[in-house]
Amino acid sequence: MTSKWHPVQLNTPISTNEPSPNRRRDPTNLSLDVAVLIPCLNEAVAVEQVVAGFRSVLPDATIFVYDNGSTDDTMKVAGAAGAVVRAEPMRGKGNVVRRMFADVEADVFVLVDGDGTYDATSAPMLIDTLLRNSLDMVNASRRSTSDLAYRRGHQFGNRLLTGLVAGFFGNRITDLLSGYRVFSRRFVKSFPALAQGFEIETELSVHALQLRMPIGEVATPYGERSEGSSSKLNTYRDGLRILRTIVYLIKEEKPFAFFSSAAVVLAVVSLSLGIPVVLEFMRTGLVPRLPTALLSAVIATLSCLSFASGLILDSVIRSRAEARRLAYLRIPIRFSRMEKSERIQKEQC
């Protein structure tokens, strides 16, 4: 995919007046504010390269590095590289993202991991796609540039989890677990961010799919980690947490599909137990397996209750989805001129 986007266009004023030389402090400058959000845990080896990479392609963006309790020199290195460094002591990527989304104000948010595996030069293309098509999220679909980029089993797990989400919420994202995304202000400020760990990417995707937000996806290079840097993702433990999150989100967002599926399973079990008893009764007029008959009846009752619960909860979730949609629509996709002017004036003071 090609793009004519150039970094300086991000800060081209909306008005037709000539821009001030000091564009970042001029209250009349109503250009787009871009924030690069980098959550980090023990990434002293790679974070300088990441900050420098985004600084070179987005020279007018503000780069934030949120440290998640590192025991190395991540904060010191990031600060020396020119990033705004802040700390979130509560461990877990989801906790860091929730804090970043709450603290930072901007028009466009670039979320990227601090391990150096994502391509900084793709950021202008991702932002251009977001702005040109007025989208709320652009997902960077990873294309491996090295055999060592993915750990063993990660590609299969990603495809499996992506397919599961696509089956229930829509097939609009091909890389569910990408840590490189661009968001509108409207998305960031309406996102509840309930996840605590690496399942945050799943929650971001499902939030966009469930509210039917305008989203896009762009293929970007994905490389191996810098030498000396290690992944914080535990393949099995975090994989199970992500799977558990998907199941939970299906239950919360698609209750009829979840409970009706459970009802079908219970109905099959009930019939497999009950049909032999019924056939025996029709043939002999006796019920020699009374406990089996009672168990079949109880499971059949549970099946009916599960189906009824799905119907009721589906109506509830529809009302909740409408409320979330209205809350999302109340947030402007970008700062208004007045908001931006007031914010710049406060910064000058």
Image (tube, rainbow, N blue to C red):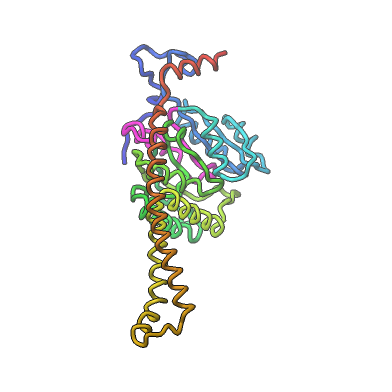
Does the stretch in magenta take in 32? no
> With 28 as the anchor, is 73 left or right in this view?
right
Q: Who is closer to the viewer here, 153 or 323?
A: 323
Q: Quarter holding the N terminus?
A: top left
User: How many circles with numbers are drawn on the protein?
Assistant: 0
Q: Is residue 15 above or below residue 48?
A: above
Q: Residue at x 41, y 39 (%)?
A: 122
- Residues shaded magenta: 107-136
> With 48 as the anchor, is 10 left or right in this view?
left
Q: Is residue 304 above or below residue 68?
A: below
Q: Residue at x 46, y 53 (%)?
A: 246
Q: Name the spot of residue 152 as percent of width and height, x first.
A: 50, 60
Q: Who is closer to the viewer here, 219 or 295?
A: 295
Q: Name the spot of residue 264 as percent of width and height, x first.
A: 38, 65
Residue lying furthest bottom in this view? 284
Q: Is there any visible trace of residue 56 in the rendered image?
A: yes
Q: Name the spot of residue 6 as percent of width and height, x first.
A: 37, 29
Q: Name the spot of residue 222 as percent of width and height, x first.
A: 45, 48
Does the stretch in magenta take in 115? yes
Q: Is residue 307 above or below residue 288?
A: above
